[in-house]
Image (tube, grey):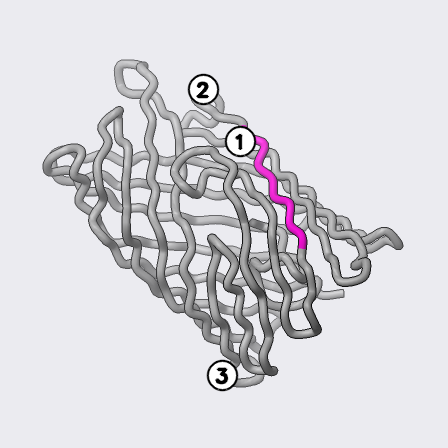
Amino acid sequence: MIICLAGSGMVNGQDVLQLGLYHQRDSQRAFSGIEGLNVQQIDTGLMSPLFVKPTHAGLWALAAHVKESRFNLSGITQATRRFYRFSVALDYQPRQVGRWQYRWHIEPSHYADESIFQQKRLALEFETLAHYRINKRVAWVVGARQDSRFGDSRIYPVFGLQSRPNKKWHHHWVFPDIYSEYRLKPKTKARLFTSPSGGSWRYLEADSSIATFGINGWNIGLKFQQKTKSPFELSLELGTKILGEGSVAGQKGNLDNAYYIKIMLGKPIRF
């Protein structure tokens, strides 16, 4: 998600919007569906808040996200596929009432290949969450989300437990984005995490036929986040991709495990 609010479970911090630029590069992975084919994924993205409005009823936020996913194919064939995602998200978090805190997120998204408009897929992605606070340190989370992170567009449950046992630890054991974060120093944090990693795109072949490209799997990794002297924060993410499955030009198969590195420069906006 590109809008990160207190209690959303996506990031640590209170009432945070993120302005950020990120780049992720994977190692090559063999694809069993086509003998001799290797796949490498490279992602680059930009996130930017457009509008933030605290009101008596709660917090409204509007943000944009632009992402390029580049797939380098090698081995039996040499090709590069570029896919794009453009989205604008509206996020609303009403004021907490008693022990309950709610959040609604709607994100119209435009998926496209290199042509941008010839082959496109429009999707209305959303998330709805409810937090029930047992006390100041522990909360149950339940909700639902629709997106393509499991390889195709689907609705899936979000559930689990959030806790802050002390000032250094923050646990977010909420499916499917699970992590534990530890504050090493006042300006340095480390996070151990697992999360789904996937997507689905359509593109035009050389003969003008329509083909699909899809990936599904899980990321496991370690993330370091460092505040700098400037308003920006630098984060480094090192991880591995496991349980990968893919669909290339109608052929389905498994993907080998891969390693990846992700670097992000971001500026939290607090209020």
Disc number for residue 184: 3
Q: Label 1, secondary structure: give it.
A: strand
Residue visible at 48% across and 49% down in the picture: 45
Q: Label 2, secondary structure: give it.
A: loop
> Vertical placement of 259 versus 188: above or below?
above
Q: Label 3, secondary structure: give it.
A: strand
User: Outermost residue, front direction?
Assistant: 134
**Which quarter of the figure has residue 164?**
bottom right
Is 125 colored magenta in this rendering? yes
- State which region is magenta: 123-130
Considering only order in the chain, which callout, 3 or 2, is on the residue closer to the N terminus? Answer: 2
Disc number for residue 118: 2
Considering only order in the chain, which callout, 1 or 2, is on the residue closer to the N terminus? Answer: 1
Considering only order in the chain, which callout, 1 or 3, is on the residue closer to the N terminus? Answer: 1
Q: Which residue is mark 1?
A: 110
Q: Quadrant of the C terminus?
A: bottom right
Q: Is residue 36 left or right of residue 241?
A: left
